[in-house]
Image: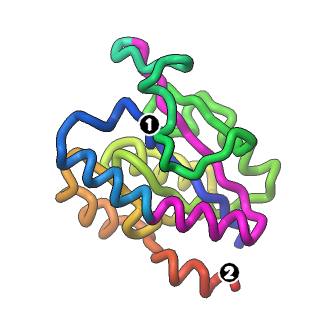
């Protein structure tokens, strides 16, 4: 197993929509940052995926497109820009993972029932073995997170640390 951490759509645009969304994102970022630190210690890839939506004004160079300051993504991490829910659709994500020998994307981010789930399914379509990272998913409706977790493979950060030790 060669994993990479995929951090999906944790962008400033999605904060400020509601207190519930902000709380969900901030809670997930705590776990995402712990996972990022672990992946870095292990020398494993961390990939940042950012959504583009011209109609919503979510474009590179706009403040909403940027990552929140408290997210531990680095400028030299691979950054993938997507226009579809599935992060693999019409992006170089698959090639970025294949070039690094990755067969297991560990997926986290926003929004559990949309882009995260679509990317999970997209990984399956490409014969990868995706896993969702427990407690590292966010949603504007956090009640959807347990459902998404229940229908997909899921790992806790502690479990992942044991697997990769």
Q: Is residue 51 magenta?
A: yes
The answer to whether residue 142 is above or below residue 146 is above
Residue at x 38% of width, y 58% of height: 28
Q: Is residue 154 magenta?
A: no
Under circle 2, the secondary element is: loop
- The region drawn magenta spans 31-54
User: Residue 115: percent from the left, percent from the top?
Assistant: 40, 42
Q: Quadrant of residue 78?
A: top right
Under circle 1, the secondary element is: loop
Residue at x 24% of width, y 46% of height: 21
Do residues under tags 1 and 2 come within 8 Å of each other at their CB atoms? no
Instruction: Report the front residue among 128 and 4.
Output: 4
Q: Is residue 16 left or right of residue 137?
A: left
Q: Which residue is mark 1?
A: 11
Instruction: Report the front residue among 23 and 5.
Output: 23
Q: Give the CA distance from mark 1 to mark 2.
A: 29 Å
């Amino acid at each position: 197993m060669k994993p990479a951490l995929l951090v999906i759509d944790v962008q400033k645009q999605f904060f400020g929509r509601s207190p519930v969304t902000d709380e969900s994102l901030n809670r997930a970022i705590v776990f995402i940052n712990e996972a990022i630190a672990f992946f870095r210690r292990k020398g494993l890839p961390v990939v940042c995926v950012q959504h583009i939506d011209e109609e919503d004004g979510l474009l590179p160079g706009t403040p909403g497109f940027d990552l929140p300051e408290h997210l531990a993504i680095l400028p030299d991490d691979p950054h993938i820009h997507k226009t579809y829910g599935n992060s693999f659709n019409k992006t170089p994500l698959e090639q970025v993972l294949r070039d690094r020998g990755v067969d297991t994307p560990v997926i986290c981010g926003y929004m559990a029932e949309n882009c995260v789930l679509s990317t999970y399914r997209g990984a399956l379509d490409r014969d990868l073995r995706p896993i969702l990272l427990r407690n590292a998913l966010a949603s504007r409706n956090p009640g959807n997170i347990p459902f998404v977790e229940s229908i997909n493979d899921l790992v806790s950060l502690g479990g992942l640390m044991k697997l990769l030790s």
